[in-house]
Image (cartoon, rainbow, N blue to C red):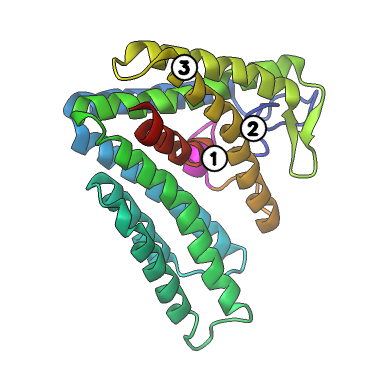
Amino acid sequence: MSDTSPEAGGRSRPLGSPHTRSLVAAVTTAVILIGLVALCYALGVPYLFALASIAVMTALFEILDSLRRSGYAVAVPVGLAGGYALMLLGYFDRLSWSAAALAGTALFALLYALRPGRGPHAAGDAAWTLLVTTWIGAGGAAASYTLTLHGAGGGMRLLIAAVLTVELFDIAAYFAGTYLGRHRVAPSISPGKSWEGIAGGTVGALAGGVVLGSLFAHLAIVDGVVVGLLAAALAPAGDLIESLVKRELGIKDAGRLLPGHGGMLDRVDAILFTLPFVAVYLVYVAL
């Protein structure tokens, strides 16, 4: 999440500083997003996949465009094509072809690096293209694959429940970090994140996981607890990784699309980092 947002456990802020974003704007944006998810859920799997595709591809474009604006000559069309290919492979249950999609992304990014006027760091530009495509695309593939689990309705509910578990971590971390945050987690990367915020977020994620485990016939409470623990461990890691990349690029937000939240990547970074691990657990252990 953005380094300037008002949170000391999930979203960052300098400890003890006033909030730098409007909470009203953030809540309003969140309500609109929840409404869109509810509408797509009512319409069915293809619509929820379309909404997920828009979110993931917007996030991928934001980071590719941020790299380009920071002086890296990344292959934006190649990255977008590779990321969407991963989402389609997840949606059509063809994840075994993901290696081919990533290999194609790498090869075309390297071919793009051979062009005239390629700049002084062409191989590094190709590496950045492949890295962010894998990072964002893997989360998108996990989201689209989860939609196919145990029939249409079951997959949609599983995906929404997993996302809400991560969001509960974020919300609980926001308040715990804001009011209790004293001990910083990684001040050189994201000065506002505190251990108190992460502790509060863990409570929120575990609560969400318990609810998830109790609502699905194919899951046990312990499965929900594991999902909650995965969210608690990986959501802050996803936040910190985005903060690390933004610091290297010298930017505060990946974009300005969502009032109160920054860009789409600032909104979904933790979700995209957590979903692949949750999907692996659901497929190979829980279901």
Q: Which mark is residue 41?
A: none
Q: Quadrant of the C terminus?
A: top left
Q: Are marks 1 and 2 in contact (CB under 8 Å)?
A: yes
Could you tell whether 255 is left or right of 7 in the image? Answer: left
Does the magenta-highlighted stretch encompass residue 258? yes
192 up-or-down from 245: above or below? above
Residue neighbourhood size for the residue with mark 2, other residues' Cα within 10 Å, grouped as few (<14), some (14–19), many (≥20) = many
Q: How far apart are marks 2 and 3 (CA)?
A: 33 Å
63 up-or-down from 7: above or below? below
In the image, what residue occupies the spot 54% across and 33% down?
261
Q: Could you say where residue 268 lies in the image, as x and y percent from the top left?
A: 48, 38
Q: Residue 5 carries which label?
A: 2
Helix, strand or loop at label 1? It is: helix
Mark earlier in primary sequence (3, 1): 3
In the image, what residue occupies the spot 49% across and 64% down?
130
Residue that numbered label 3 is attached to? 222
Helix, strand or loop at label 2? It is: loop
Is there any visible trace of residue 24 in the rendered image? Answer: no
Residue that numbered label 1 is attached to? 266
Q: Give the range drawn in magenta.
A: 255-269
Residue 205: quarter of image:
top right
Amino acid type shown at disc 1: Asp
Is there any visible trace of residue 190 in the rendered image? Answer: yes
Amino acid type shown at disc 3: Val
Could you tell whether 81 is left or right of 256 in the image? Answer: left
Mark earlier in primary sequence (2, 3): 2
Does the magenta-highlighted stretch encompass residue 176? no
Mark earlier in primary sequence (1, 2): 2
Query: Which of label 2 and label 3 is nearer to you?
Result: 3
